[in-house]
Image (cartoon, grey):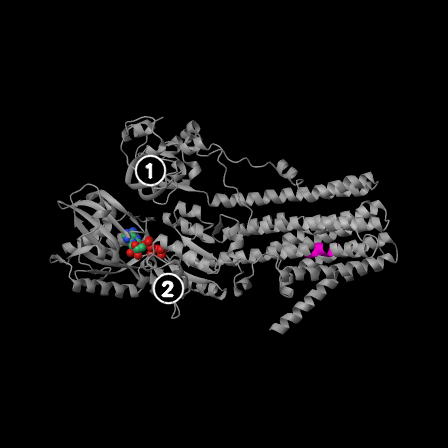
Amino acid sequence: MNFYAKSKDEIIHEFQIGTEGLDDIQVENMRIKYGSNELLERQRSTPFIVFLLQFNDFLIWILLVAAVLSGVLGKLESTLVIAVVVLINAILGTVQHLKAEESLSALKALSAPKSKVIRNGETVTIDSKDVVVGDLMLVESGDFIAADGRIIDSFSLRVDESSLTGESVSVEKDTLLIDETDLSPGDQHNMIFSGTHITYGRGRAIVTSVGRGTEIGKIATLIEEATEKETPLQKSLDEFGKKLAMIIIAIAVLVFALNLYRNNALVDAMMFSISLAVAAIPEALSSIITIVLAVGTRRMAQENAIVRKLHAVEGLGSVSVICSDKTGTLTQNKMSVKRIYTRSQLFKDNELDIQREHDLRLLLMAMLCNDSITNEHNEIGDPTEIALVKLGEIYGMDELEVRRQYKRISELPFDSNRKLMSTLHDIEGKRLMITKGAMDVILRRTTMIDDANQISPLSPEVQEEIERMNNLLSKEGLRVLAFGYKELINDKLDIDDESGLTFMGLIAMMDPPRPESKKAVSDCRKAGIRTVMITGDHIVTASAIAKEIGILDESTQAIEGYRLESMSDEALKEIVPTVSVYARVSPEHKIRIVRAWQELGFSVAMTGDGVNDAPALKQADIGVAMGITGTEVSKDAASMVLTDDNFATIAKAISNGRNIYDNIKNAVKFLLSGNTAGILAVLFASLFNLPAPFAPVHLLFINLVTDSLPAIAIGLEAPNAEVMNYKPRDIKEPLLTKPFAIEILIQGSLIASVTMVAFYIGMQTSITTATTMSFAVLCLSRLVHGFNCRTKEPLTFNILFSNRYIWAAFMIGASLLVAVLTWSPLNKLFEIATLTNEQYLMVLGLSIIPLICIQTVRRIRKRRYQ
Ligand code: ATP
């Protein structure tokens, strides 16, 4: 249907909606009639498929082959145990996968795109997927358009339709009927389309199609949600796992050959090699990382930081610079007018004389060049403008009444590049453009001054006086807005009209810093993270606030954005470390600042809220968007969204990110050191021509059953505030560093030694007793080793009991071990000999030796470095 060829009234008539929008019943009817606003969703895997996928793993194939071979070789018990363990592993894997998926999709729902519509006469923000045909949709700069619609109001509306048409220049939109047929979307200038976004202006449209009926839906009916790529950590561990598997297979083959060469029985030779493979491969690793990331991001969401891209969790740990907006992030975004400068005099907010025509006119301008609304319950709009409406209220003015009296004919909406906003009205027989904006920008466009008695050209002396006043007010940390006007004859405003203004006055407002900002900045400093303020505000205002919060001091400087323009990238790189405040910055400057820091080797978190901030947010290592004031476009580009817009939340998220990374690292240490112990024990036995110290099922049982629970428990270790006392992790540092590998090797050797001692003691009785003892010691000492891996610190009473998961994991693991050792049906399956009480005591004693050794060394080290 060609909605573009219908007039505005025809469309309104066709959908039978008034200014009130749809009511609830109409919404439901429309949904039934035209469907909901969803493209075909990616089919989620069913639990059964997830279960089957667990078997698609190289290791599992090896195990299945081993099970079959064991059966063929007459070891039916082994076949059964391998089958059961593989099954348990698949069930555990399925549950973990589904849980993680559930938690990640809950997270996704939190940052689902939103749209503004008018329903039941009220403006409401709804999930974009709930938009229906017929909805009266409100769009403004920075919004993603959720459905196709016919525009019925346009105020300088410009749309970036590149996602649909490939055209990168944004197109102007209006409401005029197009009397043509077969137009492509790119030519339909009275329509807006799903998947595109507003770059400038605002407007209203009636939704004409949703979901798969939209232009983008037609092209891509099978659009998939962007699937989450593996995070760098997952990738590097995956690669590590693959390499490890190759090495292990090679060693296993060698050991097999060695055994055959020594004329050992084929069955034994094979068991040896299979044991080795089973011992070595950390099967649980990748699912544990997924779980830890999922749980960690849920915790972060509860603390107001919604992670949109999983890699951000790891990236947060290496952030070394935070480039933060000022307004609303470091400050409260609650503005109130403190001073007014007009008629060459400075007034407090309540000292204007409303009987004077001049003062009244300034107040009228503040109400008219303004989109905000306040009432008893609500304050809607930009806080800068709300402050102006509240100023009017002091003098008994009602913003809606004023706006009804002097209707807006045209407007140029505020944008942070121009730092101006203009509206056109008929006031007392004259057509006036009212312009408000940053003081310096207005002054550059001013030629005259209205000082109540007369309108005269702006002399250098007066200009100097205004600048002095601006400086004075800014030094108090006030944001200074200037007001000017100009008489025009046209019906429509153009950017070029914003010049030759007549200066009316200054209105200065306070936006106090958030009380928590100062501490967060100092916490970050302690954690080796530099905070840099990047703001559109005036340099003096920004510096005053930055000093108060502790961002700017004698050793660093504040500069204005325009200076970057004449600076080469090299020059910028040189000064970047010395600058703590960038003022009057345009979004384009932000991307250069991020790049300069990155080239110096820093990892940058950058905040942003506007439509033009998207490139900088994407360039930053961690792009942070504002949940409350941020545009949809900025949220889409960011890897993290702050639901409270608060700087302190970034600091908290970094602390959480560091903790999650540490927890993952500790879980990896636990798993790999345990596996190393298994490998070393088997290798030792094979080199010294001893019988195999374990049956494959023993190692399977440990690796897949008893080891996975403590690993998860370590991954869920509570956040530790200590992490903010260290420097950020080097962005290039791999997880598996040399010292880390050495630590794993030492701990693995310790466990392997006690295991082989147990084996040796058991050999005095019988081979089965020996394997039983080495199995029991390996299993128990790895469970106990879980406590070592929780932190780098020596265990204290408090630390020991601060994580109940590790105790639960230990208890479950130990109970399972006791069951295998003492319950006769399991005895048989696991080829277990009955141990004497003495042997049990030895198992216990040997199993805690690694813990005692590691803890003693840590204590000695701590004492030495204190
Ligand atoms: P941030 O610190 O988040 O970058 P900011 O609010 O200081 O934010 P902008 O919103 O880009 O930065 O504002 C830049 C300047 O534009 C302000 O210092 C102010 O002088 C002016 N300004 C802000 N809001 C308006 C508005 N609604 N109308 C006109 N001028 C405005």
Q: Residue at x 18, y 52 (%)?
A: 500
In the image, taking residue 484 as reference, residue 168 lies left or right, namely: right
Where is residue 804? Give x, y as percent. 64, 56
Q: CA distance from mark 2 to mark 1?
A: 43 Å
Which residue appears farthest toward the right when viewing the image? 765
Q: For the magenta stretch, what is the residue range? A: 673-678
Q: Name the residue carrying label 1.
A: 121
Q: Which circle marks residue 546 in the picture?
A: 2
Q: Nearer the viewer, residue 303 or 320?
A: 320
In the image, taking residue 365 as reference, residue 96 lies left or right, namely: right
Q: Is residue 676 magenta?
A: yes
User: Quadrant location of the C terminus?
Assistant: bottom right
- 2 or 1: tag closer to the N-terminus: 1
Q: Is residue 658 magenta?
A: no
Q: Nearer the viewer, residue 397 or 171?
A: 171
In the image, taking residue 10 as reference, residue 298 lies left or right, namely: right
Q: Nearer the viewer, residue 165 or 49?
A: 165
Magenta span dominant secondary structure: helix
Mark 1: give few (<14), some (14-19) or many (20+) Cα within 10 Å. few
